[in-house]
Image (spheres, rainbow, N blue to C red):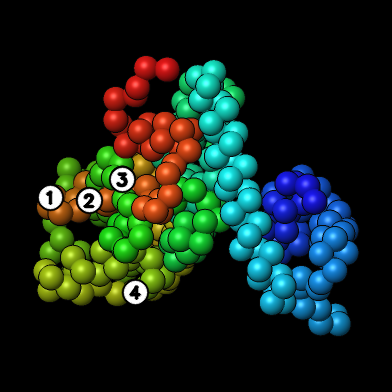
């Protein structure tokens, strides 16, 4: 029974997809199926429930046991590798990270490049997801780190905060607010707005500010993707309030106008989350230090 096969099996269960498990392990879907069948032959038990015409990933009782113990084996193997790398002072391995799009697309690339330049033997495996999935994957051990906006304290999770972002009012380039030095929250009364969907933390924060200030705006659309919101504003659907890094490039080339918001409370917190009961790999610790702008240790 090979370590690589156990990893394929646990990835299949975590991702709930043969195609995604194949992609993560750089093999074909057929190879995933073959490895699962090989595991079943090895343990003489069915590991997955099979329904004709469907490829659902549902574990049998034996599969649940193997999944739990395989996770322990993989964790022990990673710890072994980490210890061996530490003997020679080498920082390597793969850090699995799940993040929301608004942070991952606009704030992480420069940090990932800096990390890879500093630690060429290490790798960042970056996945994009919604906030609820990021938290779930961290708690379930699918990823080592999660990076999201407005992280909420939760038992079992540690939060390391990254530098805050200012929120800005995003308007079409020809809008009446474009070019203003700043806009106050009460100036937004009655304006058409393009929002994130209601379960997105940034949307909740914006709604809270409007409510606390007695400001009502007209919702014209809701999207779960920051790029779609920016495009909707660009074509004139309405205004939006977004983190400044996410609109910096579009504003620079004149596709949109990013107008400062006058009040001090228009900030977005961003945090790195990880399980409190697990020790981070050395590479993950270095990445967290880089993200939170802590002074790096000498290597």
Residue under label 4, please give it.
Answer: 219
Where is residue 219? Give x, y as percent: 34, 74
Quadrant in the rendering for residue 48: bottom right
**Residue 160 numbered mark, or none:** 3
Q: What residue is drawn where x is 75% and y is 46%?
A: 4
Label 1 crowd (10 A; few <14 / some 14-19 / many >=20): few
Mark 3 vs mark 1: give the one in front: 3
Residue 6 percent location from the top left of the image: 72, 53
Give how far apart the Cα atoms at labels 1 and 4 are: 24 Å
Q: Nearer the viewer, residue 141 or 53?
A: 141
Separation of disc 4 and disc 3 at Cα?
Answer: 34 Å
Q: Residue at x 86, y 54 (%)?
A: 31
Q: Is residue 88 above or below residue 4?
A: above
Q: Residue at x 72, y 58 (%)?
A: 9
> Does label 3 or label 1 sit earlier along the sequence?
3
Q: Secondary structure at mark 1?
A: loop
Which residue corresponds to the image point at 57% horizontal and 22% vertical from the top-left? 120
Please rate how many residues cluster around mark 4, counting C-alpha atoms within 10 Å: few if below 14, some from 14 to 19, many from 20: some
- Residue linked to disc 2: 267
The quarter of the image holding the C terminus is top left
The tag earlier along the polypeptide, 2 or 4, is 4
Q: Is residue 85 above or below residue 155?
A: above
Q: Earlier in the sequence, mark 2 or mark 3?
A: 3
Residue 79 seen in render? yes
């Amino acid at each position: 029974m090979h370590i690589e096969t156990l990893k394929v099996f646990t990835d299949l269960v975590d991702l709930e997809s043969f195609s995604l498990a194949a992609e993560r392990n750089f093999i074909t879907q057929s190879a995933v199926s073959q490895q699962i069948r090989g595991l079943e032959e090895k343990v003489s038990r069915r590991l997955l429930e099979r329904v004709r015409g469907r490829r659902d990933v549902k574990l049998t009782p034996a599969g649940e046991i193997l999944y739990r113990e395989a996770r322990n084996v993989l964790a022990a193997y990673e710890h072994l590798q980490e210890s061996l790398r530490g003997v020679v002072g080498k920082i390597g391995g793969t850090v699995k990270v799940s993040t929301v799009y608004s942070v991952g697309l606009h704030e992480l690339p420069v940090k990932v490049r800096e990390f890879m330049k500093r630690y060429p033997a290490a790798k960042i495996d970056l996945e994009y997801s919604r906030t609820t999935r990021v938290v779930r994957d961290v708690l379930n051990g699918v990823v080592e780190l999660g990076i999201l906006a407005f992280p909420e304290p939760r038992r079992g999770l540690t939060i390391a905060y990254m530098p805050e972002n200012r929120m800005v009012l995003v308007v079409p380039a020809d809008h009446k607010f474009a070019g203003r030095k700043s806009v106050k929250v009460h100036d937004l009364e009655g304006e058409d707005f393009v929002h994130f969907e209601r379960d997105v933390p940034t949307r909740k924060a914006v709604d809270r500010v409007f409510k606390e200030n007695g400001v009502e705006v007209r919702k014209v659309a809701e999207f779960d993707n920051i790029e779609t919101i920016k495009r909707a504003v660009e074509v004139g659907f309405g205004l939006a309030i977004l983190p400044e890094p996410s609109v910096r490039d579009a504003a620079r080339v004149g596709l949109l106008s990013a107008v400062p918001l006058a009040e001090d409370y228009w900030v977005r917190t961003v945090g790195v989350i990880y399980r409190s009961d697990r020790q981070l790999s050395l590479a993950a610790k270095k990445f967290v230090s880089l993200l939170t702008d802590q002074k790096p240790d000498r290597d």
